[in-house]
Image: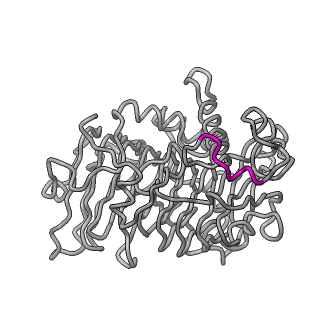
Amino acid sequence: MSKFWTLGPLALALLAGEVRAEPPAFDTARGYGATARGGRGGRVIQVTSLADQGPGTLRACAAASGPRTCVFRVAGTITVGSPIEVRNPYVTIAGQTAPGGGIQLRNRPGSRETAMPLVVRGSHDVIIRHIRSRPDRAARPSAADAITVEDSRRVILDHVSLTWALDENLGLDGENITVQYSIMAEGRDPHSKGSLACSNDVTWCKRITFYKNLFAHNRDRNPNADTQRSAFDIVNNVVYNPFSEFVEIHNSNGHTLANVVGNTFIPGPWTGGSPPPAIVFHNDTPRNTGTRIYQADNLAQGALLSPAAAALAVGAPPAPLSVRPTGRRAAHDEVLATAGALPRDATDRRIVSSVRNRAGRMTASAELLPSSAAFVADDLPYPDRDGDGMDDGWERIRGLSAADGADRNGDRDGDGYTNLEEFLGERADRLGRGACPSPAVCPM
């Protein structure tokens, strides 16, 4: 796949009309959202409570102002009575810092007023990693996404697990957004959807990347792509067991320049014996003819393109790809081995197992959410005497001080990442290495 050009962070920034000669959000960040700065150079706010609100909560860190990194000293389920909102920019929610089983968000059981557990609204430069968000199966709001990104730019979601939403598992609009290595599964009827990536009533939506994600057991929108005369990259994803549609391309916002490369589309029990085309086009604005669809190295059991999509197909990417595609087979295996919040919990293991075994169902209506007990730490939080977000032992090995919290924003090796970012990257990498060494040892 070396013929595809991968845009570096500076090139992506120039396309976005910015000059940001900084490294990507983290070393494995890819796509248009890789330009997110997150909490780089700011303060550390420790999440020490699983309560919905008050000092030491995720809500308090999300609502704070200025560059900040939310570091978790607890593991478990945070049950919210209203959405946790990220409005102030420059924040990193570092779920990989949680001990033991990690962090899960859910609605208060039976709540009607709660729309979704986590919302990024009117913000920018946001990094969210290794978080699970699962609206409670007893909740009754009319529109409950697991996560919503609204009217925001430079956002990257990495290794998040989103299931059981009453609307899309992920709803997003804005520009320069990446969703990577994530699971969007088991959207609930009567509106079971994978991801609505822009709709016809958004203000703006440009430059979106979906890279190496798993969509499973959603009726349709796996994902829905609808940009304003701009690129939408759907690269190296695995889509399993939709009812009606895999990838949907729309033109209601203007026209979409879609690159659909290296994906695996797998029908399942809910799909039935005659799978739909892997890529369909919905002509929402007949007067607009600018939509272009490029597809390569995709696998489907039925047709790759619907007749309407085939009429818009082109032989080369209509916009430069924001990521370098991996070969489809290798990408398929990587997604099943590592997508979602790590370490994987029982729900994600079950979902991945259903893909491997060509089993499973669309809805989670009969399933109980994991309790907080399922996420109790099996070890203590790493020692952090000076509260700078970095493990004391990690600091000592690298010549930093476990008694000097200010060294978190230094850059000991001069690579553009702060010492705290180096630690967060290594912490996430360690989770990835332990996610699934081989199918023989994974409890799939």
Task: From the top left corner, tell me how far across and down residue 282 is, in percent.
Answer: 25, 65
Q: Is residue 208 visible?
A: yes
- Using the image, determine if residue 151 lies above or below residue 346: below
Labels in figure, total: 0
Image location (x, y in percent) of residue 106: 68, 61
Q: Quadrant of residue 212?
A: top left
> Bounds of the magenta span?
406-413
Image coordinates of residue 232 in percent, x first then y, are 33, 58
Q: Is residue 173 left or right of residue 420?
A: left
Quadrant of the image containing the C terminus: top right
Query: Residue placed at 63% from the left, 53% from the top?
Result: 132
* Residue 407, magenta (yes or no): yes
For the N terminus, give its image quadrant: top left
Can residue 222 be seen here?
Answer: no
Q: How is the image coloured?
A: one colour
Residue toward you, 35 or 341: 35
Decide whether residue 185 is among the magenta residues.
no
Q: Nearer the viewer, residue 178 or 293?
A: 178
- Give the left or right position of residue 363, taking residue 21 as reference: right
Q: Tell me: 347 left or right of 389.
A: left
**Residue shown at the point (44%, 69%) measured from the top left:** 173
Q: From the viewer's side, name the closer residue of 169 and 404.
A: 404
| Quarter location, residue 100 | top right
